[in-house]
Amino acid sequence: MLDIGHPAPAIPGLDLGKDPTLVVFFETDCPTCRLAVPYLNKLAVGARVIGISQDGDAATEEFTKQLATAFPVQRDPGFALSRGFDLKFVPSLFLLGADGRVLRSHFGFDKPVLNEIAAQMRCTPVADEFDGAPRSKPGCMSRHLEPQVEGEFAPAIGAPRGAPASVIEIPDGEDPLEYCFRTFGDGLPVIPPTAERIARMLSGAPVDRTEVIARVPPCYGEATVEKIAANAVMAGCVPDMMRVLLPLVRAVCDERFNVHGVQATTHFAAPLVIINGPIRNELGFAYRQNVFSNVARANSTLGRALQLILLNIGGARPDGIDMSALGNPGKFSYCIAEHEEANPWEPFHAEGGFAPEQSAVTLFAGEAPHGVSEHTARTPQQVLKSISYALATVWTYRLCLGSEAVVILCPEHARTIHRAGWSKQQAREFLFENTGVPVRAYENAPDAEGTQLVSRYKEVLIDGERCYQKFRAQEAIRIVVAGGTAGKFSAVIGSWAAGPRGSEMVTYPI
Amino acid sequence: MPTRLINPMNETPVRAAAPPARLGSLKGKTVGLLDISKTGGSVFLDRLERLLLERFQVAKVVRTMKPTFAKPAPPGIIEQLRAVDAVVEALAD
């Protein structure tokens, strides 16, 4: 790739100004490119960023819409620019000076490098060290070096293909329902995945049925589109649900989420699915009363389909590799949508850089919800204080810094907090600063879980009492508004081991 | 007519690896001890190391630790253990 001092080829329509310009090459199906976009968006606020897509019009348009790119993007027909910049990988970043020479070049995602580039462009840092994204991530091979796509512009062409699924014949004397119940199920009857039903389900997924969407840990089974469809049929999904299931399977297999660990741990964790955006109403996801329970086909079947995929393709069976000591009722289905209409602040996925009108799916490795009733408090402080007492107990009371939590704020609590003029960020800061474990709780408990680690904890004063701060940073607490508009019941959901050493929350566009 | 179902299970071919031949004796061998980084692992492995060296005349013990118990061992750790004659992995909490 072009290095410092090399003259860069002219980019059509681009006049280099006196300030440096950052040129970024990307592929629309490259996870690392997708990871980089929110940071480039931040950079584009104060500096000039130009995106070059190696893919076709439709894929590029979908990419820029889904990720709400805040910088101009153009295509690279015939890969002339990719060749001119001598690309090997994407994303590739070239910082160009006013004279058209390369001031700096880099490939892949790297937070320190992004911050150094921001400094060179006289911008504030764009990548926080602990924002949930990895410090660095390698990218993909440049599209023009994939021999089979020379001169073509369809990202799916490069997608891996799996073997077609085998056909199982159920003899006439056997009840197909009983056979499926016994062989593929989650302890409940499933709908037999007949060829006809699979064909109908596949009508909701305009991709080749043998395309491999991901390899599902811990057994790394290939999740082809038709195997995903087969499990969707068994779970009772409508064909349109494939729009959500394909990005959901990609998300659950994202290395940051670490489903390998989530599925094999002895802990209670199960992947909690959170749906945002217009898809909620398009497919009928419930977000009002009973959001965690048996209220809507969309929630029940999407959550169940994910679990069946993890069981049947991923291989983490509850009587085998899945070693959870107590399990989690969410392993039947654990899917909610945000009650955006009752959320007085920006929707949850917008915090991750998505446009509110972009649908998105988020995954969190969570325990079962722990309810917090607070019917008499009238101020944000009092409501949040009640929630902070539940937050202090996640994982186990005395262990600090190791876990994260999702706070499900019911609409009435959200309204009380908002009515006093508080932002969501203020609520989060209050929860962070007020959640702690009193130092006295560690006295006379030298062997208790969490006591051995007190040297790493930060001591703070909460209401005049010496406490250890429960969470490592305010980012460890996420706020989602969901539930019915009557009843002042919120909930706290603790995480499995959090962060890069465990599981990180991921959000994918739909 | 029989009902025809599309197999929803994992059918990805798995390449079976033949297990190495069992060691006749530990005497003079190099043994790797892999700590998965759970709290009690080192207690167990410290004791095991002493036993291997004193009672079983193991020539050398190679100690290594995964950065996190929550994920598979990274390639560097596997490489480190490739040269040893046997490995004990400790899962103690």
Image (cartoon, rainbow, N blue to C red):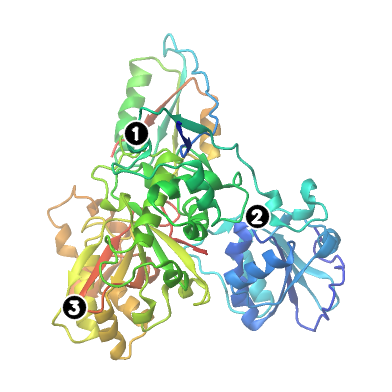
Residue bearing the label numbered 3: A463
Q: Secondary structure at mark 2?
A: loop
Q: Is residue A198 visible?
A: yes
Q: Quadrant of the N terminus of chain A?
A: bottom right
Q: Residue at x 64, y 58 (%)?
A: A29
* Coordinates of residue A129 in the picture (x, y in percent): 50, 65
Q: Which mark is residue A139?
A: 2
On whether disc 1 and disc 3 are found on a single subunit, the reply is yes
Q: Nearer the viewer, residue B51 or A360?
A: A360
* Residue type marked 3: Asp
Q: Chain of mark 3?
A: A
Q: Between label 3 and label 2, give the one nearer the viewer.
A: 2
* Residue type marked 2: Gly
Q: Secondary structure at mark 3?
A: loop
Real-space Cα separation, disc 1 to disc 3, in angstroms = 65 Å
Q: Residues within 10 Å of mark 3 (few under 14, many from 20)?
A: few
* Coordinates of residue A461 in the picture (x, y in percent): 23, 74
Say whether disc 3 or disc 2 marks the residue closer to the N-terminus.
2
Q: Residue at x 74, y 54 (%)?
A: A142
Q: Residues within 10 Å of mark 1 (few under 14, many from 20)?
A: few
Say whether disc 2 or disc 1 marks the residue closer to the N-terminus.
2
Say whether disc 1 or disc 3 marks the residue closer to the N-terminus.
1
- Asked whether disc 3 touches disc 2, contact meaning CB atoms under 8 Å apart, the reply is no
* Residue type marked 1: Asp
Real-space Cα separation, disc 3 to disc 2, in angstroms = 48 Å
Residue bearing the label numbered 1: A175
Q: Secondary structure at mark 1?
A: loop
Q: Is residue B68 visible?
A: no
Q: Chain of mark 1?
A: A
